[in-house]
Amino acid sequence: MPTDGETTFADHTGRFYARRYGMAPMVGRVLGYLGVCDPREQSISELADALLASRSAIAGAVDTLETLGLLRRSRAAGERMDRVCIDMSSSRALGFDVSEYQEQGELAQEGLRLLADAPPERRATMLAWAAFADFLVERLPLLEQEWKERMEALRASGELPEVPAPRRDGRAR
């Protein structure tokens, strides 16, 4: 069973994600709990018990987090259930995925084509949107590289431990 502190942290995370991103609070609660629980890999049933929620609410939250690239599912040989854990190894999970901004830039360009004959004042919003998307597509890879270098320096200094990789049987080491 989770501690009061773990539950409170999960609730705070749920409120943050609901307020900041308009997500269902359960999405943030699951993410928050997975950030502090032990073991770090949990089944849907274990999450439902810990967060006093229905399995369907947990499954929906897990699906959302998996779609966002923030979770990884695994299944140990012989088990009939998936386990999930936070996965911060991808560019997408860390917020460095440029594809979102490439798509936004394409949308802005589509809007600009619609406004091809419009006065500059009417095109201003689309021009700014396209420029901002281009800026992020250019800068995010550089920021990601800077983060990787900083992370390696933190690991080398002992301030940031390696996240244990899951074993082949789906359990954390």
Image (spheres, rainbow, N blue to C red):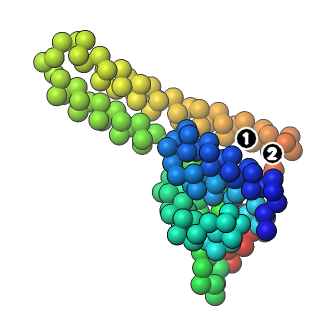
What secondary structure is marked by label 1?
Answer: helix
Answer with the quarter of the image where residue 75 lies. Answer: bottom right
How packed is label 1: few (under 14 Cα within 10 Å), some, or many (20 or more)?
some
Residue corresponding to mark 2? 160
SS type, badge 2: loop
Q: Quarter of the image for the N terminus: give it.
A: bottom right
Q: Where is residue 117 drawn, in percent x and y?
A: 12, 18
Q: Which amino acid type is marked by label 1?
A: Met
Number of other residues with Cα within 10 Å of mark 2, as a class: few under 14, some 14 to 19, many 20 or more: few
- The circle on residue 151 is 1
As drawn, the label of residue 163 is none
- First reached walking from the N terminus: tag 1 or tag 2: 1
Q: Residue at x 17, y 23 (%)?
A: 115
Residue 73 visible, this angle: no
Along the horizontal axis of the image, is 46 left or right of 159?
left
Give the residue displayed 55% in from the left and 45% down from the top. 18
Looking at the picture, does residue 3 appear above or below residue 74?
above
Q: Amino acid at mark 2?
A: Leu
User: Residue 124 location in percent, x, y?
Assistant: 29, 16
Q: Residue at x 50, y 63 (%)?
A: 60
Q: Nearer the viewer, residue 45 or 114?
A: 45
Q: Quadrant of residue 130?
A: top left
153 to 84, vertically: above or below: above
Q: Marks 1/2: CA distance? A: 7 Å
Q: For the C terminus, which image quadrant?
A: bottom right
Q: Residue at x 23, y 12 (%)?
A: 120
Q: From this viewpoint, is residue 14 visible?
A: yes
Vertical side of 139 occupied by 39: above or below:
below
Q: Given contact means CB atoms under 8 Å apart, are the residues at marks 1 and 2 in contact?
A: yes
Q: Residue furthest left?
A: 117
Residue 26, position as x, y percentages in the image: 58, 56
